Amino acid sequence: MQCHEIEYQIFGQDIQMLEIDLDPEETVIAEAGVMTYMEEDIEFAAKMGDGSAQGVMGTLFGIGKRMLTGESVFLTHFTNTGSQLRRVAFSAPFPGAIIALNLAELQGQVICQKDSFLAAALGTKIDITFHKRLGSGFFGGEGFILQRLQGDGMAFIHAGGTVMCKELNDETLRLDTGCLVGFSGDIDYDIALSGGLKSMFFGGEGMFLATLRGTGKVWVQSMPFSRLAERVLAHGMSSSQGES
């Protein structure tokens, strides 16, 4: 299924908003709860799956995987039912940046963290993929469950804090599992122990690191939401203990 051709603008610096232009009968799909505003003639409906042509069994299998990983089985479809260009806008649920991905220029596929998907042109296949080594995945935290975005159109993901795009040319990059947003190209992904026992328990960098090898693009975020939540929780607990 060929993706709908959509145009877009990204507004803001630290807490960004994505505005998408929809011609008549064009549709964009998005995660539930990320819509900011929509103009008249835009109709929306919650549907099971991404709407890509994959058959009944393929749709059910995809829904089952999303349920297993705690993801919503529904995606919201926004369609321009009028006769003029209309706009719909989305924003991420936490501070950070929105990354625009032209899948046609990225070999038709990007692998990203399971909570990073924001929106995409209709025709984009959104699938859950598991880390190939279950043992390291269960202990590796955020890196175990990933999303695969496939298609030939535009897709949008969001990340926390500042985002950097690293270009690998038959190289290796190691990073905190939570700081990995996504990657494209011919890249092999693995989760491994960060070092010796002393470094793991007292180094403050976590027990596991994501290792990426190959050629392609890697998007890295400076402030994953999990890290932000931990700091806020720790600060709240220390404040409450001080008051008591």
Image (cartoon, rainbow, N blue to C red):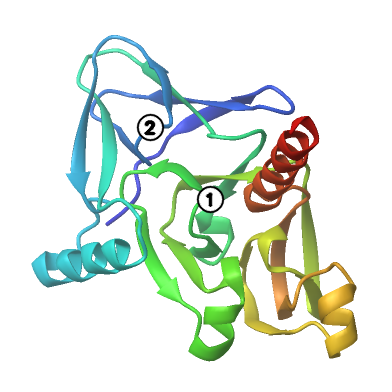
Residue at x 61%, y 76% (from the top left corner)? 140
Say few, some or many: other residues with alpha carbon within 10 Å of mark 2 (under 14 / 14 to 19 / 20 or more).
few
Residue picked out by circle 1: 116
Q: Nearer the viewer, residue 131 or 88?
A: 131
Q: How far apart in space, not on screen, are marks 2 and 1 (Cα)?
A: 13 Å
Asked where in the image residue 219 lies, by quadrant, the reply is bottom right
Q: Is residue 20 above or below residue 54?
A: above
Q: Is residue 148 left or right of residue 210?
A: left
Q: Amino acid at mark 1?
A: Ser
Q: Amino acid at mark 2?
A: Gly
Whether residue 232 appears in this view of the structure is: yes
Give the percent coordinates (x, y) of residue 120: 42, 44
Give the percent coordinates (x, y) of residue 96: 68, 37
Residue picked out by circle 2: 33
Outermost residue to the front:
244
Q: Nearer the viewer, residue 90 or 186?
A: 90
Mark 1 secondary-structure assignment: loop
